[in-house]
């Protein structure tokens, strides 16, 4: 039985051994998850206790960023919450007395820059502040005039809405409740039930019926009137009863349209169907048409008083109290009489009962084809129940099957686990009436194990593939090289299992009963090749018998208790399913007994973390294994986790360093693989300060809008960094930066980003994040328009004849070394001079290759 994991809170002062003995975190699951990989769990505190209230809003943090700021635009009837994220996005949430809902997708205020604050001014302006700009995201467009409610909803202006009495789209200046905000996107609707009428009713003879309805959204109207086509222009005032309104109308047996009217006219309409009482022959049909279902007499009436003195009735809005079938599907074997268990609910006076229903299918031609040369298809039908001359509203599916349709043992066993009463006895037969007293097992085949190797202490999650290796709820045992696999789980019925490898760490042979009594064991030829025998206590004191050759001649050796059970001595995989075992299959899995840590590089990381550390050793890389990696000081009280990043090979893996609270020298690397194998390496590791990044120099801070121009970042401490990346949603390039020295980094500028709020003028200066491992800072550049070049006149180029390319803005966003000029497919034009308006270059000596006979194309790249 699998137990759910529990989370325990520990104190800060816990040694690292205790930490590893209690906790493990799955690797390679959530790259944004830092909590699970923290060495110590801490408390989460707030001003109010956590409750079980429904969340107001949630969003995929990996797409929009964590919400860090809120601003509330409040009105008398509703509010709009503006949510700012770490990635410079703004989302909106509508909140009113009915709950909350998100309003569309997040809009981008400024790429990658966190929202620092949101301020609402006089419920009109909504100012969003990032690190270097302030944006007003309020929608101030006027409300549309002369439109319908649906047109008004499309405006999405939080101040605009549909004034129901005035039938116009306008701000709610009078703070009336009969007003719908456009951000809600919902016009007034009416919910009304269909009605029952007595069988003798005609259009010429009407009866008074109470029409019940309610509004959505749930707006309270002081004076609302009903009007319908059979009543002419007459207005009948609606009376509020609890959550409903009621109007008493004279109705016949034909459908009609109900109009709801305020002083300004019709505000909403709906169609109501009319049914005769005799048509409601079930509980749900009755209550859905505003009738009452009498439980004892099993009949539908218009008024609850008509239930002949009964107090037990089911009324409108009580459909869940009606009798119903709860079973989803039933199965029957063809040609057999069966008792089918059918679960039902609300068969009064019992709330939950199980009905035994007798069904017999005896005729072959009823449901199957009579041609036995072909497989007959299974028959499918709906089954209904009837009690006291009334049917239960819903039904259940019933399938009639034939076991002899399944020709193989594997298919027969599979169908057995699909609720068919079949089993294999040389052929697939039904198990009803003792038809298969001694079921046979299908031959078990084992194909492979993935991964095919793991640490000898076990704990590795493996997938075992084969045939007939078990179904859910089977009793399955997997033995890998003598070690029992734990937590066996069926992944794919009959073909794939998963389990955690058991420990293959061989316990000394000195405990084997009777082994120490064998005379002359030390002189047996070939004894030195037996793994583990050299550790037997007292072996050297046994008096030798030099003439004994081979273990087979020692009397009684086969009787040594437990010798066959030594874990790890066998090299085969066996699977047992419900007591039937497979033959051992060798060379599918290998336990590694020698695991060692040798080294790691680099040997330092900044406080913010993120450095990729490559750890090398012997037999330490296992795809799919779970790793816990930490660097600790000598006391083991201060440890920094290193999250597994990638398995490189059997001898190497890479992890990503976590953050630190301070500069520190760590002295020990601890690695736990699959919870069971612990490795240590004593070697110093330094936690150093974050780099210092200077603002861009003037000559580097101006770039072309197309991006790609190299610029130099200056500062200090860059040699302690592993990778530098420009974080930008448009340009995805891990090689866009390289570290030139401890004080210089060369990067490519990202492309200019057009803002989403294009209605407002923007400065050509933009900001973007640069990540030095996990230390992130922002830089500011001035974007200028890309250069343009004039078309070259037709001319002949020759040896030592310069080419002059004219243009504009050539040097405004790049330096000379950023330009390259290609001629044809393989020629280079060496730049000899460059200004803001032209480039002079010297073509190659030989004629470049070209796809055309005469014309040669010149390509200028920057």
Image: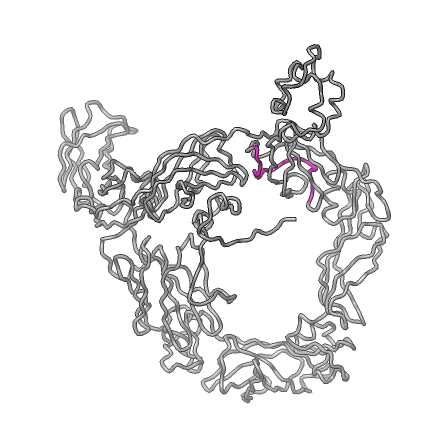
**Where is residue 399 shown, x and y percent of the image?**
75, 53
Question: Foreground: 381 or 314?
Answer: 314
Residue 855 seen in the current view: no
Residue 520 vs residue 685: left or right? right
Residue sitting at x 71%, y 62% = 326
Query: Residue 765: image x %, image y %?
Result: 23, 53
Farthest-out residue, top: 547
Closer to the camera in the image, 549 or 365:
549
- Considering depth in this image, is 517 or 822 the residue closer to the camera? 517
Give how far across and how far down residue 83 sits, in percent.
38, 63
Quarter of image, res 290: bottom right
Q: What residue is drawn where x is 36% and y is 80%?
A: 173
Q: How many numbered dots are placed on residues in this image?
A: 0
595 sits left or right of 695 in the view:
right
Q: Nearer the viewer, residue 575 or 629?
A: 629
* In magenta segment, residue 740: no
* Whether residue 75 is situated above or below residue 832 in the rendered picture: below
The quadrant of the picture occupied by the C terminus is: top left
Above or below, 205 relative to 816: below
Indicate how the structure is coloured in the image.
one colour
Range covered by the magenta-colored residues: 456-471
Q: In the picture, residue 117 is in which quadrant?
A: bottom left
Residue 410: where, in percent of width, then height?
73, 38
Tell me if 608 is positioned left or right of 503 in this view. Answer: left
Regarding residue 272, the answer to whether it shows in the image is yes
Q: Residue at x 50, y 66 (%)?
A: 51
């Amino acid at each position: 039985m699998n137990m759910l994991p529990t989370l325990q809170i520990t104190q800060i002062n816990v040694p690292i051994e205790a930490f590893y003995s209690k906790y493990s975190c799955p690797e390679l699951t959530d790259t944004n998850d830092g909590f699970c990989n923290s060495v110590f769990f801490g408390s989460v505190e707030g001003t109010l206790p956590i409750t079980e209230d429904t969340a107001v809003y949630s969003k995929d943090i990996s797409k929009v960023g964590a919400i860090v700021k809120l601003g509330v635009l409040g009105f008398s009837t509703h509010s709009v919450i503006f949510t700012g994220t770490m990635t410079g996005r703004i989302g909106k949430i509508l909140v009113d007395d009915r709950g909350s809902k998100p309003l569309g997708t997040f809009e981008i205020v400024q790429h990658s820059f966190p929202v620092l604050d949101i301020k609402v001014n006089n419920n009109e302006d909504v100012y969003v502040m990032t690190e270097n700009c302030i944006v007003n995201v309020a929608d101030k467009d006027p409300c549309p005039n002369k439109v319908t409610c649906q047109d008004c909803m499309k405006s999405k202006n939080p101040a605009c809405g549909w004034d129901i009495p005035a039938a116009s789209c306008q701000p709610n200046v009078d703070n009336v409740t009969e007003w719908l905000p456009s951000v809600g996107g919902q016009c007034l609707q009416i919910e009304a039930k269909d009605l029952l009428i007595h069988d003798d009713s005609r259009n010429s003879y009407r009866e008074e019926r109470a029409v019940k309805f309610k509004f959505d959204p749930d707006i309270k109207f002081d004076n609302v009137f009903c009007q319908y086509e059979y009543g002419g222009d007459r207005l009948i005032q609606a009376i509020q009863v609890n959550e409903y309104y009621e109007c008493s109308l004279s109705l016949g047996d034909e459908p009609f349209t109900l109009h709801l009217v305020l002083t300004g006219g019709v505000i909403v309409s709906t169609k109501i169907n009319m049914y005769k009482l005799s048509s409601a022959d079930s509980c749900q049909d009755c209550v859905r048409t505003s009738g009452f279902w009498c439980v004892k007499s099993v009949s539908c009436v218009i008024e609850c008083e008509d239930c002949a003195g009964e107090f037990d009735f089911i009324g409108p809005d009580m459909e869940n109290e009606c009798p119903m079938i709860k079973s989803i599907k039933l199965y029957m074997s063809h040609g057999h009489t069966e008792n089918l268990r059918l679960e039902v609910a609300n068969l009064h006076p019992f709330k939950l009962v199980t009905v035994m229903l007798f069904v017999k299918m005896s005729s072959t031609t009823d449901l199957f084809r009579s041609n036995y040369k072909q497989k007959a298809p299974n028959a499918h039908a709906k089954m209904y129940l009837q009690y006291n001359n009334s049917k239960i509203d819903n039904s259940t599916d019933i399938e009639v099957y034939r076991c002899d349709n399944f020709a193989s043992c594997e298919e027969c066993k599979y169908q057995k686990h699909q609720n068919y009463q079949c089993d294999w006895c040389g052929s697939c037969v039904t198990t009803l009436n003792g038809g298969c007293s001694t079921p046979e097992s299908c031959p078990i085949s084992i194909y492979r194990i993935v991964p095919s190797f793991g640490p000898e202490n076990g704990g590795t999650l493996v997938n075992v593939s084969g045939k007939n290796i078990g179904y859910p709820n089977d009793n399955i045992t997997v033995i890998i090289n003598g070690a029992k696999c734990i937590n066996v789980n069926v992944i794919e019925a009959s073909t794939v299992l998963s389990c955690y490898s058991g420990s293959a760490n061989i316990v000394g042979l000195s405990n084997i009963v009777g082994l120490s009594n064998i005379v002359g064991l030390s002189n047996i030829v070939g004894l030195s090749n037996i793994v583990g025998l050299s550790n037997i206590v007292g072996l050297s004191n046994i008096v030798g018998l030099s003439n004994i050759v081979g273990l087979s001649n020692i009397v009684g050796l086969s009787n040594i208790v437990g010798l066959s059970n030594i874990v790890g001595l066998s090299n085969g995989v066996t699977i047992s399913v419900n007591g039937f075992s497979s033959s051992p299959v060798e060379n599918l899995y290998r336990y590694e007994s020698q695991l060692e840590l040798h080294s790691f590089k680099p040997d330092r990381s900044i406080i913010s973390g993120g450095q990729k550390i490559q750890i090398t050793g012997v037999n330490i890389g296992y795809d799919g294994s779970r790793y816990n990696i930490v660097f600790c000081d000598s006391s083991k009280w201060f440890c920094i986790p290193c999250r597994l990043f990638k398995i490189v090979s059997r001898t190497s893996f890479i992890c990503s360093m976590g953050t630190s609270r301070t500069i520190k020298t760590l002295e020990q690397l601890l690695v736990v693989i699959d919870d069971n194998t612990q490795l240590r390496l004593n070697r110093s590791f330094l936690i150093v300060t974050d780099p210092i990044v200077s603002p861009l120099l003037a000559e580097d801070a101006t770039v072309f809008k197309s991006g790609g121009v190299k610029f130099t970042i200056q500062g200090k401490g860059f040699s302690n960094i592993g990778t530098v990346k420009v974080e930008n949603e448009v340009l995805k390039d891990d090689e866009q930066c390289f570290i030139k020295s401890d004080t210089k980094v060369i990067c490519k500028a990202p492309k200019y980003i057009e803002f989403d709020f294009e209605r407002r003028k923007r400065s050509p200066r933009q900001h973007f994040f640069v990540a030095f491992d996990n230390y992130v800072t922002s830089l500011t550049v001035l974007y200028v328009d890309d250069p343009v070049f004039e078309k070259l006149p037709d001319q002949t180029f020759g040896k030592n004849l310069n080419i002059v390319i004219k243009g504009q803005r050539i040097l405004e966003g790049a330096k000379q070394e950023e330009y390259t000029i290609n001629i044809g497919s393989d020629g280079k034009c060496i730049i000899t001079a460059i200004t803001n308006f032209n480039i002079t270059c010297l073509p190659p000596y030989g004629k470049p290759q070209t796809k055309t006979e005469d014309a040669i194309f010149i390509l200028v790249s920057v």
